[in-house]
Image (cartoon, grey):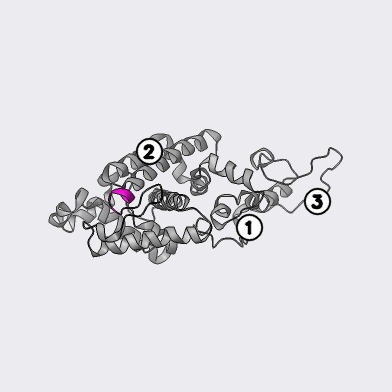
Amino acid sequence: MKPSLRSHIYNAVVQCRRLLESDFSRQLEGTYGVHTDGTFEPLDGLTHLDAVGRADRQAIEAAIRHEEVAGATRQEAVERYVRESAFTFLNRLAALKLMEHPSRALIQPSVGAGDQSKGFQQFSLLSPEAMRAQPGGGYRLYLELLFDDLSQTLGVLFDRTLPTSILFPTQSCLQEVLDLLNDPALETVWAEDETIGWIYQYFTPTELREEARRASSAPRTSYELAFRNQFYADNTLGRLWWEMRGGETRLTEQCQYLLRFTSDDLRFTSDDLRPKRDPRELRILDPACGAPRGAV
């Protein structure tokens, strides 16, 4: 993928992350009584919550406390919950964009034109009155049902039973995120299989990645492992390709953590070269694929 396209992806992902995190933080505080400083309002005082809302608050609190057990402060745990919730939702929209692309046509167009998408328009015809009674005309309901349907085959990516699936963006936030993803400058990236990987790569703030690396030369928690695994990628697929090409590849500059010969006296010989293969046929075992993002 050309650097200019990756730059467009980066800019869109950063803006989407900020929009979703801001929106979800406001929802956590205003609806569920969970503040960004780590304060939990007593559940009994949240009289506006119905039984489902109370159960959601308890699930959110449990997820945050789980991060505390792993060593995070309460404030860090809330921040991680918001970030993972935002990542989960953005990842789902990106997956829908990839699946609905004409080159795949795995689902009816559902997000490319927002609530004017063909899939939602057909869905609305099933019960127009019921749709009018739904907030936002039923588009949220449509997306949630689509997530549930896809979860039957794609598992965790669309599993709405996870605590990080409780929050759903407000209508205005969702529209802004869709506008960013549907920017004409990104039109060609949705035909590329690697797009979902770049979204993953660009989602974690650069300052967070750098801070973690300054603090420790190795990941200290599963949370850090999830966004510090580029070393593994560079030295598995990256190194295989590098060795197949005898070092003559752009990956030499693109893979920051690739271990390679540094001395001019060390040169590739015929014994060093791997047989060239179609990269689509390569199979790599990722022993850390059970990490939250690695599983995606």
Q: Quadrant of residue 261?
A: top right
Query: Is 30 within the magenta?
Result: yes
Can you identify the residue that label 1 sits on? Answer: 282
Amino acid type shown at disc 2: Leu
Dot 1: within a 10 Å radius of its alpha carbon, few (fewer than 14), some, or many (20 or more) residues? few
Asked whether the residues under the numbered discs 2 and 1 touch, taking CB atoms below 8 Å apart as contact, a structural biologist would say no
Q: Kindly report which numbered mark, 3 or 2, lies closer to the viewer in this rendering.
A: 2
Which label number is shown at residue 90?
none
Q: Position of residue 96 (x, y in %)?
A: 38, 51
Q: Is residue 282 left or right of residue 268?
A: left
Q: Which mark is residue 180?
A: 2
Check disc 2 and report its element: helix, strand or loop: helix
Mark 3 or mark 2: whose residue is earlier in sequence: 2
User: From the viewer's perspective, is 283 left or right of 206?
Assistant: right
Residue 238 point in image, percent of width and height:
66, 49
Q: Which residue is situated farthest in the bottom direction here?
A: 152
